[in-house]
Structure formats: structure tokens, C-alpha cells
Image (cartoon, rainbow, N blue to C red):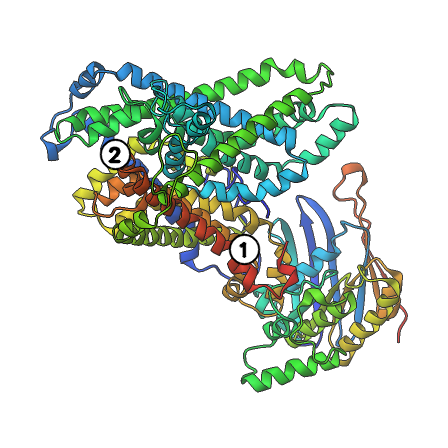
Amino acid sequence: MAAPLRPLTLEGPLPGSERRKQRGASPEPRWLGAAPALTLAIFLLPVLLGLAGTWGPAFGFLPALGGTRTSLQPWRELIQAPGLGKAVGLALFTGWTSTLLALFLAMGVLAAWGDSRAFAIAHRLIAPMLAVPHAALAIGLAFVIAPSGWLFRVAASLSGGDRPPDILLVNDPWGLALVLGLVLKETPFLMLMALAAMGQTRVRDSLRAARSMGYGPVTAWGKVVLPQLYPLIRLPVFAVLAYGLSVVDMALILGPTTPPTLAVLVFDWFNDPDLRMRFMAAAGAVLQLGLVVVSIAGAWAAERLIFRSTAHILANGRRGGGRAFGRAIAGLSTAALALALLSLAALGLWSVADRWRYPDPLPAAFTPDHWARSLPGLGHPTLVTVTAGLGATAAALLLALGCLEHEHRAGIRPGRGAAWLLYLPLLVPQIAFLFGLQVFLSLTRLDGTWAALIWSHLLFVLPYVFLALADPWRALDPRYARIAACLGATPGRIFLRVKLPLMLRPICFAAAIGFSVSAAQYLPTLFAGAGRLPTLTTETVGLSTGADRRVVGVYAFVQMGLPLLMFVAALAGPALAFRNRRGMHP
Amino acid sequence: MTAAGLHLDGVALRLGGRTLIPSLTLTVPAGEIVTLTGPSGSGKSSLLDFVCGTLAPAFEPEGRIFLNGRDIGSLPPEQRRVGILFQDDLLFPHLSVAGNLAFALPARIRGRAERRARIESALAEAGLPGFGDRDPATLSGGQRTRVALMRTLLADPQALLLDEPFSKLDPPLRARMRSFVFGHARRRALPTLLVTHDPDDAAAAGGRVISLGYAASGGNNNQVSGLTLARGREE
């Protein structure tokens, strides 16, 4: 399957866009022309409102809680909060380390393995890997690396220990477990974005040229491809960095506790029964935003510095072998993939484990009891997850298709500045604006409603759906639409009868991505749902810190299984619909 | 203008300040196949796009187009009743052969049985009876070209544009497809414009041959060699 994501495009009457009217073309319905503006409003408005609604309380202004005068008091309290410095340090350490490692691993795998046949197969696995929610992966990873987890059981059953070692591996004070979890989750994402971007550049030609001049594969990649590729995946890298710096759900499960990372600290303050803590929490949320802004600026500066100071290396003519590097990357990536798969398997195993004494490598007996006990409680969160996921995905598809069809009919070329707008919800830390958004939602009595829940998910679903759909849509042979018009079909009929069916595969794929993004949302569900609309993710994360591993295993397994099921359906649907159409299979 | 046929009146095409076609006035009467030749980039295909209303927005066209007396230049493509065939057949891969033909058949032909009969007779006319349920991807090149022509004709066009429709076919097949396509165009008395590089196409078309040429050197945009009108072999 062609990689569906590309970082650098959006259209609409936006900076850098170019618009020309096609002569003699059918007049475009007004509602379609409004699609880009509506799309932007739908996802920019909540972010801006949310930021404003957080900045107010950060400076003492929140009338609902008696804050009617602006002051710097929240900031004074924030600075004196115990553990703040360490929490900031942990956020910076885990965010930067995980991003750099994920980037290194993703680039390394592409450089060392990008041309192999094994990679062509692995490529198909990347997208489903993205569908695994952060929380499920984190829980599974904890099951594997904890002192009483799988790895130590296997080690102990070989060496003969009978008690788990007394060391802190999950929730370690350095945040290393969190870094590991983030690396496992973000590496496939960066690989997918890089693969999509490589479709835009003439990577293979460049690589072939460099190889024929005697450059080793890894050196050729580093000297020829990377300088072309990095600018194209800069925004996804920034999104990964922003996410790593401010993640809450994974940090709750894997991260340090005393103190936790800044985002978790702020999250705890927002949840404190003492409502006055919210002012300090809001100030912390603004600080979190600052951390991300400064980090992104730092990443940008570092990129320029590195490319400038290494320019002479590109020209020094050294061909390098890179074989050792290739072997190292191969080992690392295989270990990472194995760890990720083990983690997911651990969820399933614990969910059916009966007696599983340390250090047995496998349970002594299996039982369906945990499933039977959990099923009644799973029903409602599953329903909420499915409803929110389908609702947000459907809305995102409608908006994205509207924008793309408008782009086609109005003859607009996508602008570059627009990509930043599209990425905005992925760059602004969730904790930095969701509280403010909740303030506005409760003012309008929308908090805890389905509309608020779906809208809050839509903010994060829309960019992914758009990115997944835009490339294949723009790559569709425009002559199909032209010949349909010459056969007498109106633009509406062309859209419904020609473009939609031809695009069924990428549409279903985008929908599956959208659903998995929605299903994984933790903070938006808590804030917009006001605790009244629990999803599998909020329930699973809630259980993960205290409950029995077996029950957590059941919840996390379902949380992971639902998006995967959607991916299977998204792949099977078009394949089945076009089983007798050879031209529809790539 | 009330004359029958396709009439181009002072048609000019520019792209990014460069003049592709300075000015072309041409009447194609019903049943004549006029051949347009010229080097790549001379604007032949763009001229066809202009006539059927699908010219890319980057072009700056001028002039008027009349079809059987109707001024179609400002109509959207679906209202012009101009059929077109490309070198790729562009059969919709998601539809069956019959589905492709039904897509073209106007909605005013009502009733399932009537529509199916029209499609079946079109298939028979193309020498492909019973091919309706086939997946277009399973047809041979010649079969696909024939289905593509029948699809174009079922939309009931009043003029036909052919954009190198035979260039991707093997030489022996090319001759058969030429006579098939040209035969249909003449039988229906369609004014037809053919764009081609192949002198044999022009000879078989039997109508006038128009060379579109331009001087690309020197960067002088006004240096256009102009149009040469030549008499092709008359029937």
C-alpha cells in the first residue's frame, strides 16, 4: 500500500495559496467554497479559545472561581511548588531523548534497510502499529519490563531466582521507561512520514546515482537523502517533540512519580479537589506551552546549525562503508519491534492468565473469568469510544473531502504556510489548552455532551485524516474527471460516481487512522467529556495504576483491538467491494 | 452563426506569456475529420481541452467556439456535448464494461430494459456482444479502445475530439482501430478534430491537415511561425 501521509500540504485561501478560476467550469456551490474556512474555524477556534481560557486563570482571572483581578500570584505559587524544577527537567529529558532516539532509529532503519524486501513487508505493518493506542502499548511495556514482568520471569526461570528483583524499572525516577515507550510508539510514525515524504523527492534516483559513484548504502543515504528529506519531515518531528514533552497518559503509566513530568504535575493540580489549585495549574499549563515553543525553536536552530556545520562533510568525498552501522541499526530496530510485539502479546496473555506465579515464564492455567467479569463494565466505554470515533471520523472525512474537492474545482494549489495551521493541534500541548476549552464549554453548558466530546476528538483526528487523504486525492489522474465531464456528468455526479469510488481505498484507510486517533485520546476525553463520557482509553488508564493486571489486561486488549479491527475492516472493505476489478488493486 | 459543424473563431492560446496558438479560425463540417499536427508543446492537446471545456486554469485562451450554431465557449464541459478520446482509454476501473457505458448513457433514456438494450446493442456494434459484465482491466488494448469509443458515442456528442487515440496500440491493431473509430465518426456525421503525430492517421482521416508550429528558440515570444494550412487527401 502506498504511504498515505505527507506532511507538507493543505489548501484553501491561505498564505501562499494560488487561485485561478477555470474557464467554463461549472459554478461551484457556495457551501463547498466555504469548506476550507469552516475546517480552519472548526479546529483553530477551540485551540485559540482554549489557550485564552488557560492564560486567563494563569494570571488570576477566572470569575467562576472568584478570580476577578489579574495577578501574578499563580506564578509565584508555581515557582514555589515542590518538585517543579525537577518536573521541568524530566519533561525536557524524556521529550528530547525520545524524539532524538525515535528520529535516529527511523532514519537508521530507512538508511540501512529501506531497499530490502523485508522492509517492503514491514512497511505494511507500520500503519497498524500506529493504530495501537499509547496507553495500551505503555501498559503492555510495563507488563514486560517490570521487575515482576515477563523479561525477569524468563531470566529468573533460567537462573533460578524466586523473588522479583527489588529495582524500579517502571516509573523509574529518570523517566527511562517513559522514553522507551515513546520511542516504540513514535518511531513507526516518523518512518511512515519519511516514507511518504520520500515519494515527493527523487530519492531513489539520487541514491542510485550515489551508489554508482561508490558510496556505501548508509553513507549515500546520509549524504544525499537526509538533507533532502529532513526539511520535509520537520513538522512531524516537531509534533513528536511536542508530544513527548507534554504527554500525560503514557507518563501516568510509565513515567516517574515523585515528582512526575511537568504535564502530569499540572494534570494532577487540575484534578485537585481544592479548586484554588487551578490557578497554579493554569500557570503550569502556560509554562508547558513555553517549554514546547522553546524546544521547537531550539530544534529548528539546531537543525540549521547542524546542516551548516556538516556541509563540508557532504563534500569530503568519503564513501564510507556503514556496514557496522547497518548491523547496529538492524539489531536495535529488531529489538524495538520485538519489545513492542511482546508488549502487545503480554496484554492478551495477562487477560486470560489464571495462576501465574513468579518466576514461571507462562501462566500455569488460563481462564476466561477476567473477561467474563469485565464484560459488563466494558459495554458503555466501548459504545462511547465507537460513537465518538465514528462521529469524529465522519466529520473529519466530510471536511477533508470538502476541502479537497473545493481545491480541485477552484483550481487552487496548496500553500506551504497552511501545513503549519494543519499541524497546530498537534504542536500545541493538549494540557496547555484543554482546561481553557473546558472553561468555555462549561460556560456554554456544552461540557459533558456528545458534541463537545466529538469536537474535541475532531481537533486531533482532522489533521491525520487530511494528511492521509490529501496525497492520494491529489494523485488521482485528473483525466478521469475530465472525461466524465465530457460524457455529460455534472461535477456532483463526478464526485459521487467517479472520484469517491476510485478513492474508496484511501478514504477507508484515512477513516481507520482517524478512528484510531480518536480511540486513543485521553486528555480531550476527560476534559470535554467532563467525566460523564468514559471511553476505553480513560477507563484503561484509570485502572492501570491500581487494578489487577488481569483486568487491566482485558481493558487494554480491547482498547488496542478496536482500532485494529477498524484497520482490518478498512482494508477488507474495498478489497471485497472491488474483488472483481483488477484495475482497483495496486 | 447557425452553420452546422464545429466552428472555431479566432481561437488563441497562451501559457505563461508564451503564445502557443496565435489565432485559429476553422470550420469543421459534419463528417469531416480535420487533423492537427505539430511538435510536442505546440498546443494541439490544449486546443482540444479548450474545445471540450477542460483546459487547465494556467492557460489564457481567447476566441469563441460554436457547435451547430450554439456558442459553447462559456458552457461547462458537461453541457457542451463534445466527446473526447485520449491515448489512454480511461475506462473507469471501478465499473464493469456495462457500468462504463451506462455512465455515459444520458438519463433521459429511461427504464432499465431500454438502457440495457442500448448498452447491449452498443457492445454488439463494437463486436463485443456479452462483454457487459466484464472487468475492463481484463480486456485487450483493442477491446478497451472500442469500449472507450462506444462510451463516448453513447453520451450522444455533437462533435468528436481524438487526442492521439491510437498511439499506444500495436501497428497492426492501429489500422483496424482507425477504420473503426473514423467509420463511426463519419457514419454519425460528427465534426471531428484529430490530434496526432502519425502521418498514417492523417492519411486515413482523409480531411484537411493543419500544422501547428512555433519557434521555441531565442526566447522571443512573438516569433511564431504561424499556421500552415494544407489540403489533405480528399475522399
Q: Position of residue A63 (x, y in %)?
A: 12, 33
The reply to whether label 1 and label 2 mark residues of one chain is: yes
Mark 2 Cα-neighbour bin, 10 Å: few <14, some 14–19, many ≥20: few
Quarter of the image holding residue A355? top left
Nearer-N-terminus badge (1/2):
1
Check disc 2 and report its element: helix, strand or loop: loop
The residue closer to the viewer here, A136 or B119, is A136
Q: Position of residue B201 (x, y in %)?
A: 85, 65
Residue B200 vertical placement versus A517 (above, below): below
Q: Position of residue A496 (x, y in %)?
A: 50, 64
Q: Tag 1, which chain?
A: A
Mark 1 Cα-neighbour bin, 10 Å: few <14, some 14–19, many ≥20: many
Q: Are marks 1 and 2 in contact (CB under 8 Å)?
A: no
Q: Position of residue B92 (x, y in %)?
A: 63, 64
Residue B181 vertical placement versus A172 (above, below): below
* Disc 1 residue type (three-letter): Arg
Q: Is residue A350 visible?
A: yes
- Residue displayed at 63% across by 70% down: B96
The residue closer to the viewer here, A584 or A463, is A584
Which dot, 1 or 2, sits closer to the camera?
A: 2
- Residue displayed at 58% across by 28% down: A107
Is A466 left or right of B194, judged from the image as shown? left
Mark 1, residue position: A505
Q: Tag 2, which chain?
A: A
Mark 2, residue position: A546
Mark 1–mark 2 Cα distance, whole angstroms, equals 42 Å
* Disc 2 residue type (three-letter): Gly
Check disc 1 and report its element: helix, strand or loop: helix
